[in-house]
């Protein structure tokens, strides 16, 4: 077992642990914090199913963003949809035999990598070109885009420029899952790709990527508009 | 004090999103509350010595009490969707009036003191210590937000700057740095019963005077009852309705509706105010205490229904919060919603054919409707989503033949605040108010130019007062603004058999 393999195996366990524990803590923290008052942005659904549908439309279609700004919507939606496809495609490295739908997603997944980069480029360009967005951008906003772009670019490079021994990579990943470590190919591009992914996982619970769980907990979106019909009471605001 | 000099925004030209004008509004802030006003609400009389620690402690408490605050401080990705949505930014160009930048004034402190990334790498994530300068900036810019929630409509995560503003104002109050306008008014509501400090005897006189006026104008005895036990309806209305123009015209409209429908109703001296400024300053305790007066009045008078007059934030507080704060009230008649908007009541009567309305009485008017922010984005009327838009419009159309909509990008849930909501209706903020009204004035100008609109109806006391004040800056008559029930008052045929 090479030092490199031990290093990367440890890195992935650590990153996965930080990601899972950090995210679980955040979700728990959001869930336990009461929403004492009814504040859905109206007009709002008047049934629970309606409110759930509203949240899902935000998650899947970015409904509010679409109404707000078509450029941000196009770049943001393309990036996220492409990211979802790319993640689905990567499931082939963690499953044996590969699930049917994952196999089906493979061809689209390749193009998604390019679309992801294009979406990121659009979002990043806005941070320079639009005065208002330039004003609100912080270093971390740029670094997060750089991180994601780096992941996408190194991933595409592995496909088109510097192919690695993908069978060995899959063996390494499955080895991580089944606690039966296998050697990791020492290709620089692959190592960069994996390092950035681990970094992203570790940063997730401590960064603005919390918008992902946050959208599910947003009272203006997930609350039902029924304050007259049902008395809304939470612990500290009771009596 | 001399009025501040400023230029009224031009409504011509195509540029709607301004170029950034840094610190353009850095000098705009309300007068601070004095020690008496602060202490009357249980807040320190002046900025406390340990304001730094106290402010952070209060922020910590609020983070544990409000999921909205916690999630919204975490979730923002600086995408920019909200940056061109706030009327104060559009009117002033001050970048700190972009909703995200306003939130960031609090968020940077949250990041520094409450998050790992901000503790370790402050400059990387835009985290900053709470300094005296930041505290002053909070006072300045969280008093340039009217809590209108337009940004929350457009945010992909539904981040509502109003929630951030309310938290910031609550923190400022807690360290002894409150606004005179809001806190003085809250004191009055507790001491006298209404925001304007109108004592019971004066209220009684005003209402008697109104009975005489209506009798003179119509020949009919329309009553304006006060503290009548056994009435069916308790009407709670903004106190401006009792004497301010054009508010009083709507009050006469309410009375005529009750008269023709044969509903026994009453005002209450104890709850002679629908407004609830506790909401504006983000104080749950004040909001509850102010709302409780209405419950006490309803129980004392033995009414069966509670109806709210034309007031935007009052309707939000009543519709969205009362059931939580003071509900349920067992003695009310469960066949009617608690609470009920005057427009819901009038609309139901129109549908039943219980009102004789002659729309020709308003033929001299070409009417448009300004959706008030709190009604549009924080409440509902009737049984279906969007009833808060259709019901007032249907009333207008039943009372007037000429109705025109403004640009749909500025109505319904996309409506622009009048420019003085959220506790900013005070003269030292006049520049902010005039500039903040610009987006609405732009849309109004379009329908004036194209359709000769000469009357903008609205159902909010703050909107009415604000437009009356700022319309002249845009060279319009202040009488262009009025209430929906002002139109009802003109159209209703009191002598007619229904």
Image (cartoon, rainbow, N blue to C red):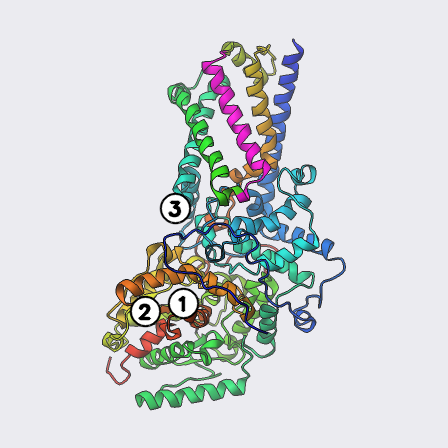
Q: Position of residue A237 (x, y in %)?
A: 59, 58
Instruction: Please identify, in this view, whether the residue under mark 2 or under mark 1 is nearer the observer.
Output: 1
Q: Which residue is mark 2?
A: B347
Q: CA distance from mark 3 to mark 1?
A: 30 Å
Q: Residues within 10 Å of mark 1 (few under 14, many from 20)?
A: some
Q: Which residue is mark 3?
A: A67
Q: Residue at x 26, y 65 (%)?
A: B451
Above or below, A80 relative to A104: below
Q: CA distance from mark 3 to mark 2?
A: 31 Å
Q: CA distance from mark 2 to mark 1?
A: 33 Å
Q: Residue at x 48, y 72 (%)?
A: B331
Q: Residues within 10 Å of mark 3 (few under 14, many from 20)?
A: some
Same chain for the residues at labels 3 and 2, yes or no? no
Name the N-terminal-most of marks 2 and 1.
Answer: 2
**Label number found at residue B203:** none
Q: Residues within 10 Å of mark 2 (few under 14, many from 20)?
A: many
Compare residues A2 and B469 and report the one nearer the observer.
Answer: B469
Of the 4 image quadrants, the one containing the C terminus of chain B is bottom left
Q: Residue at x 62, y 50 (%)?
A: B63
Is there any visible trace of residue B178 in the rendered image? Answer: yes
Same chain for the residues at labels 3 and 1, yes or no? no
Compare residues B323 and B65 and report the one nearer the observer.
Answer: B65
Does residue A152 belong to the magenta stretch? Answer: yes
Q: Position of residue B156 (x, y in %)?
A: 46, 44
Q: Do the residues under discs 2 and 1 have CB atoms within 8 angstroms?
A: no
Q: Which residue is mark 1?
A: B474
Does residue A166 belong to the magenta stretch? Answer: no
Above or below, A191 relative to A221: above
Q: Which residues are magenta?
A: A135-163
């Amino acid at each position: 077992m090479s030092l490199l393999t031990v290093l990367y195996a440890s890195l992935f366990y650590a990153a996965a642990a930080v990601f899972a524990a950090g995210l679980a803590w955040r979700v728990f923290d959001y869930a336990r914090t009461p929403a004492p008052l009814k504040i859905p942005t109206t007009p709002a659904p008047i049934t629970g199913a309606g409110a759930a549908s509203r949240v899902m439309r935000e998650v899947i279609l970015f409904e509010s963003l679409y109404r707000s700004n078509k450029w941000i919507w196009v770049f943001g939606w393309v990036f996220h949809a492409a990211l979802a496809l790319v993640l689905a495609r990567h499931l082939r490295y963690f499953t044996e035999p590969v699930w049917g739908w994952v196999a089906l997603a493979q061809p689209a997944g390749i193009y998604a990598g390019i679309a992801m980069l294009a979406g990121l480029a659009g979002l990043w360009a806005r941070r320079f070109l639009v005065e208002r967005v330039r004003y609100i951008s912080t270093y971390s906003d740029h670094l997060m885009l750089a991180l994601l772009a780096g992941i996408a670019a190194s991933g595409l490079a592995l496909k088109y420029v510097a192919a690695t021994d993908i069978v060995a990579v899959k063996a390494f990943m499955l080895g991580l899952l089944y606690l039966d470590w296998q050697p990791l190919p020492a290709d620089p591009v692959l190592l960069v790709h994996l390092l950035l992914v681990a970094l992203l996982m570790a940063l997730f619970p401590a960064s603005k990527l919390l918008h992902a769980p946050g959208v599910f907990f947003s009272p203006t979106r997930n609350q039902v508009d029924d304050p007259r019909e049902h008395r809304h009471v939470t612990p500290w605001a009771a009596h | 004090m001399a009025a501040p000099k400023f230029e009224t925004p031009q409504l011509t030209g195509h540029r709607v999103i301004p170029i950034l004008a840094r610190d353009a509004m850095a000098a705009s802030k309300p007068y601070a509350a004095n020690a008496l006003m602060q202490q009357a609400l249980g807040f320190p009389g002046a900025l406390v010595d340990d304001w730094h620690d106290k402010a952070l402690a209060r922020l910590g408490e609020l983070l544990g009490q409000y999921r909205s605050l916690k999630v919204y401080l975490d979730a923002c990705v600086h995408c920019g969707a909200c940056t061109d949505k706030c009327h104060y930014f559009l009117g002033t160009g001050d970048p700190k009036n972009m909703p995200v930048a306003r939130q960031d004034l609090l968020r940077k402190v949250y990041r520094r003191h409450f998050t790992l990334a901000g503790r370790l790498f402050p400059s990387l994530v835009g985290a900053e210590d709470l300094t005296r300068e930041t505290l002053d900036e909070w006072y300045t810019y969280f008093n340039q937000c009217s809590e209108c929630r337009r940004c929350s409509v457009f945010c992909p995560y539904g981040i509502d700057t109003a929630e951030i503003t309310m938290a910031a104002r609550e923190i400022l109050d807690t360290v002894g740095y409150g606004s005179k306008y809001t806190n003085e008014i809250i004191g009055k509501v507790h001491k006298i019963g209404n925001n304007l400090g109108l004592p019971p005897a004066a209220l009684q006189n005003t209402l008697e005077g109104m009975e005489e006026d209506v009798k003179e104008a119509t020949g009919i005895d329309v009553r304006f009852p006060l503290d009548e036990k056994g009435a069916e309806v308790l009407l709670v209305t903004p106190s401006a309705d009792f004497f301010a123009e054009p508010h009083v015209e709507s009050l006469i409209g309410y009375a005529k509706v009750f008269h023709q429908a044969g509903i026994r109703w009453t005002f209450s001296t104890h709850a002679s105010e629908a407004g609830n400024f506790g909401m504006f300053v983000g104080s749950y305790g004040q909001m509850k205490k102010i709302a409780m007066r209405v419950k006490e009045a309803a129980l004392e008078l033995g009414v069966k229904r509670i109806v709210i007059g034309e007031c935007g934030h009052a309707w939000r507080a009543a519709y969205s919060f009362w059931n939580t704060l003071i509900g349920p009230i067992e003695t009310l008649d469960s066949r009617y919603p608690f609470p009920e908007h005057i427009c819901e009541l009038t609309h139901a009567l129109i549908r039943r054919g219980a009102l004789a309305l002659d729309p020709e009485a308003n033929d001299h008017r070409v009417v448009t409707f300004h959706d008030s922010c709190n009604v549009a984005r924080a409440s509902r009327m009737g049984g279906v989503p969007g009833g808060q838009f259709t019901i007032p419009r249907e009333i207008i159309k039943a009372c007037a033949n000429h109705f025109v909509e403004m640009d749909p990008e500025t109505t319904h849930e996309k409506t622009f605040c009048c420019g003085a909501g959220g506790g900013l209706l005070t003269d030292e903020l006049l520049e902010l108010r005039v500039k903040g009204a610009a987006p609405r004035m732009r849309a109004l100008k379009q329908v004036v130019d194209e359709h000769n609109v000469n009357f903008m109806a609205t159902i909010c006391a703050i909107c009415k007062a604000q437009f009356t004040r700022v319309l002249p800056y845009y060279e319009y008559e202040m009488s262009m603004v009025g209430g929906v029930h002002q139109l009802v008052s003109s159209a209703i045929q009191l002598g007619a058999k229904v």
